[in-house]
Amino acid sequence: MPFVNLNEILPAAKANHYGVGAFNVIGEPFICGAITAAEKEASPIIIAFAEVHESYVPLEFVAEMVKYWAQRARVPVALHLDHAKNVDTIIRAIRAGFSSVMYDGSTTPFADNVKITQKVVAIAKPVGVTVEAELGILTGVEEVAEGKRPTEDFYTDPEQAAEFVEKTGCDALAVSIGTAHGMYTWETMLDFNRLQKISELVSVPLVLHGGSGLSSNDFRTAISKGISKVNVFTECALAAGRAVREAVNDNSKSFPDFCQLGQKAIEDLVRSKIRIFGSCGKAV
Ligand code: 13P
């Protein structure tokens, strides 16, 4: 089937208290692994591609590959641009056929984040493309590697979130409540009271970034308190890496086998996350 956008997936998730996984992809094993997992679990799925991953593969090529599999899939598939900091990349993604985009203005001042998100909404909405925005700052991979933890100064302010959504008209909002990109080197302490407050004040579906390494309990509590979209990348990449590493010293195996083994590891990981998020059987 053709791509769906976030508004065709997330309102049902929000109303029925389950989460839909957004899994970042870089190449074929990621794409095929994630879509196969969604089909086996009869779950809607969001295939995400991050602007920074253009260092591996151009977004136009990703769009064509995902289109090929989505057209043959029996479950709804959204293709979402993740963490775009440049409006030019957003325009390219829309032209390439992405059904959803994220503008990440989280590190810019509030007024600029509002202004550019408004501009992105004005570009995307008329062509049926949904827009995710972010308020509050997420700790990045480099900072995590340096052992830096999220601090409350960077968390999303609930009143400001309501004002932001009202002013921008975005379709989904990524929030900062203590998650970080990459694997956690500390015990997570997510600010669920803040999340609850945000979800009481904000009408659009909320997004949790930094899903890798969170416990099932963290996921379930976050979803019960208003998260509808959950982003996962690092765990998929690590699972595929482990599978390849195990096979690499076996001389009977070569590169196509590595790709297949990596893909199967991603499929298994995505299936396990879909079950935790509760979206299995929700494909319609
Ligand atoms: P992780 O790599 O920590 O799972 O985060 C993924 C993410 O939030 C992509 O936007």
Image: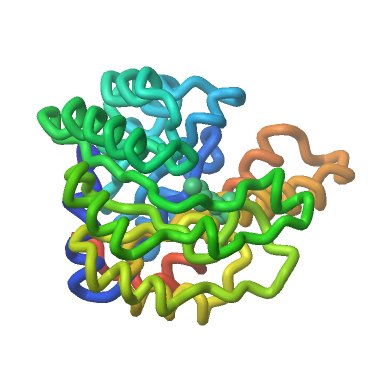
Residue found 76% across the figure and 34% down from its top: 254
Residue farthest along the left direction in this orientation? 126
In the image: residue 27, left or right of residue 40? right
Q: Residue 264 at x, y = what percent?
A: 58, 52
Q: Is residue 33 visible?
A: no
Q: Who is closer to the viewer here, 253 or 241?
A: 241
Residue found 42% across the figure and 39% down from its top: 109
Q: Residue 164 at x, y = what percent?
A: 26, 49
In the image: residue 108, left or right of residue 281? right
Which image quarter holds the C terminus?
bottom left
Which image quarter holds the N terminus?
top left
What sort of colour scheme is used for the picture? rainbow
Residue found 35% across the figure and 67% down from its top: 227
Q: Who is closer to the viewer here, 125 or 245?
A: 125
Quarter-of-image position of residue 82: top left
Quarter-of-image position of residue 43: bottom left
Q: Residue 87 at x, y = what percent?
A: 35, 23
Is 193 placed above or below 263 here?
Answer: below
Is 223 placed above or below 139 here?
Answer: below
Q: Is residue 247 visible?
A: yes
Q: Residue 4 at x, y = what percent?
A: 21, 44
Residue found 52% across the figure and 56% down from its top: 154
Q: How many numbered marks have been drawn onto this rendered protein structure?
A: 0
Is 277 placed above or below 26 here?
Answer: below
